[in-house]
Amino acid sequence: MALAKLGVVVLDCPDPRALAGFYAEVLGGTVEGDGEWVELEVPGGRRLAFQAAPGFVPPKWPSADDSQQFHLDLTVEDLDAAEAGVLALGARALDAEDRSRSWRVYADPAGHPFCLCAC
């Protein structure tokens, strides 16, 4: 028997509302709250939360000295279309040069790494 259930994944960031808005555009869903804690309820009932972190320093990818800590894998139907969409929303490519792979790495506007993965 499990000892716990996963509640919510929380991302530290300088502007919780702005980062929640970015992920709402990428994943769909509803942004709730303002201030230091904002949540995004995505389709299917899952939640992401965004927490204000004064002095936030984004991880570096790839880097052995400044580990990424975690990343999100986002499944997409069309890598090229999804890439165009996330870049237009303010993401930046970290490792998207290899077009032969079924995944590409980006940073969200606060600098957290995430991957677009072809299904």
Image (cartoon, rainbow, N blue to C red):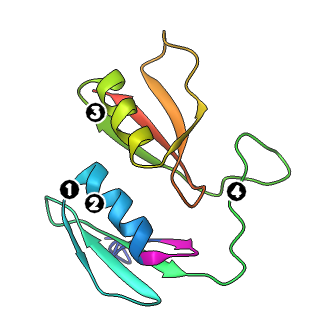
Quadrant of the drawing holding the C terminus: top left
Residue bearing the label numbered 1? 28
Q: Are there few (<14), some (14-19), or many (20+) residues within 10 Å of tag 4?
A: some
Dot 1 or dot 4: first in sequence order is 1
Is residue 108 on the magenta stretch? no
Residues marked 2 and 1 touching at CB (< 8 Å): yes
Residue with the most extreme front position: 88
Quadrant of the drawing holding the N terminus: bottom left
Q: Check the image and report above or below for 2 versus 34.
A: above
Residue bearing the label numbered 3? 76
Dot 3 or dot 1: first in sequence order is 1
Residue bearing the label numbered 4? 59
Residues marked 3 and 1 touching at CB (< 8 Å): no
Quick one: SS at disc 1? loop
> Where's residue 98, x and y in %?
56, 15
Q: Are there few (<14), some (14-19), or many (20+) residues within 10 Å of tag 1?
A: some
